[in-house]
Amino acid sequence: MKRKLIILTDPGQDQAAAILMILGRPDVFDVLGLVATAGNIHLDYTLENCLKLMVLAGRPDIPVFAGCPQPLMRPLVIADHVHGPTGLDGPTLPAPVVRPQDGHGVDFIVDTVRAHPGEVTICALSPLTNLAMALRKAPDIADKIVEVVAMLGAYFEVGNITPSAEFNCYVDPEAADIVLNAGIKTTLLPLDVTHKMLSTPARLEAMRALGNRCGVATAEMLEFSQAFDLHKYGWEGAPLHGPCVPAFMLTPEIFSGRQINVSVELTGRVTLGMTVADWWQITDLPRNAFWVRDGDPVAYYDLLLEALGKLP
Ligand code: RIB
């Protein structure tokens, strides 16, 4: 049985790699649709980027919906300093000759989960605004969602958009709080693990050497977005966040973590959006998430290259 996915995304080069990785594995994933999120860049760009990626991957059949243009409670914070003015700078991508669906992304989530109860996994690469809105509009879907697998949070690796908060959580901390308290099986891939997945020059060259348009485009995207992180961290490569989500769904055994309580700071002056991971289970708060702390980077990049190599 293929895993039915709804992908929440604000591409973003790393998320583009994640989406392409998913599309390279149609033997495993049945993508029901994408919901564009306001995050890395404004919604008009993330929506267009989703459409461009569907054309690049030869999947214009996959429906793309626009989600909310703003977080639940706060002004939008973007990351164009990392991803460029379009959010997907680097390669010249095909024109988005396909159009978004007419309906709203939140309604797509509600309607699709209700139509496939017990079958849909939410693949969350972005802030959780649209899933939180869907849960508020239709609380009944919480019991119908198989699992949320999300790139979100940081604890041992501290924050990336503030000293204490990871970007996807910081953009919409209230949304993260709603999702983490909805009683849905949830796996989080935080910076604690994504910072171990570094796109070294050899790994980028291997992507480019695939020679297909998706492999080359992925290398060009990551070669653009890496500049900020290489300067910031001084590592041998930039962390590749997004593909950790499909990689976990494909081969959870290359990762390790714990089922613990994860709480979101909503009022802190300097800790807003921090994910407080009760790793040593000091509290008796509900163990609401599987927190992934480690992973095998060699296996990770092998998975990514294998999937990219199957695309046009
Ligand atoms: O903190 C990393 C996350 O924030 C990634 O999803 C990246 O695309 C940015 O959105």
Image (tube, rainbow, N blue to C red):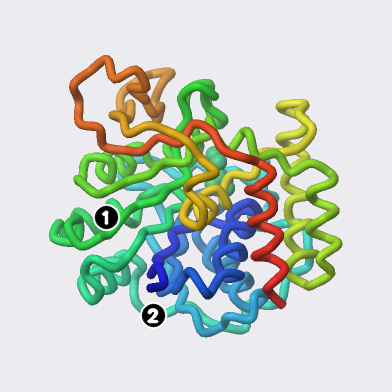
Amino acid type indicated by mark 2: Asp
In depth, the one of 252 and 17 nearer the eye is: 252
Point out which mark residue 38 bears: none
Alpha carbon distance from label 1 to label 2: 18 Å
Image-based side of 167 in relation to 198, left or right: left
User: What is the secondary structure assignment of the residue under circle 2?
Assistant: loop
Q: Disc 1 residue type?
A: Met
Instruction: Specify whether 262 is left or right of 305.
Output: left
Q: Which residue is mark 2?
A: 102
Say above or below: 7 vs 232: below
For image coordinates 34% across by 17% down, the residue present is: 280
Position of residue 296 measured from the top left corner of the image (x, y, whole percent)? 61, 40
Image-quarter location of ligand 1: top right
Residue 282 figure quarter? top left
When the figure is inspected, residue 267 is found, relative to residue 308, above or below; the finding is above
Task: Give whichever of discs 1 and 2 has the lower sequence position.
Answer: 2
Give the farthest residue toward the top.
282
Residue 45 on image: x %, y %: 57, 62
Which part of the image, by quadrant, shows the N terminus?
bottom left
Q: Nearer the viewer, residue 275 or 279?
A: 279
Q: Looking at the rendering, which quadrant does residue 170 occupy?
A: top left
Residue under circle 1? 133
Q: Is residue 287 above or below residue 9?
A: above
Give the total number of marks visible in the rendering. Answer: 2
Residue 134: name its quadrant. Answer: bottom left
Q: Position of residue 73 (x, y in %)?
A: 31, 42
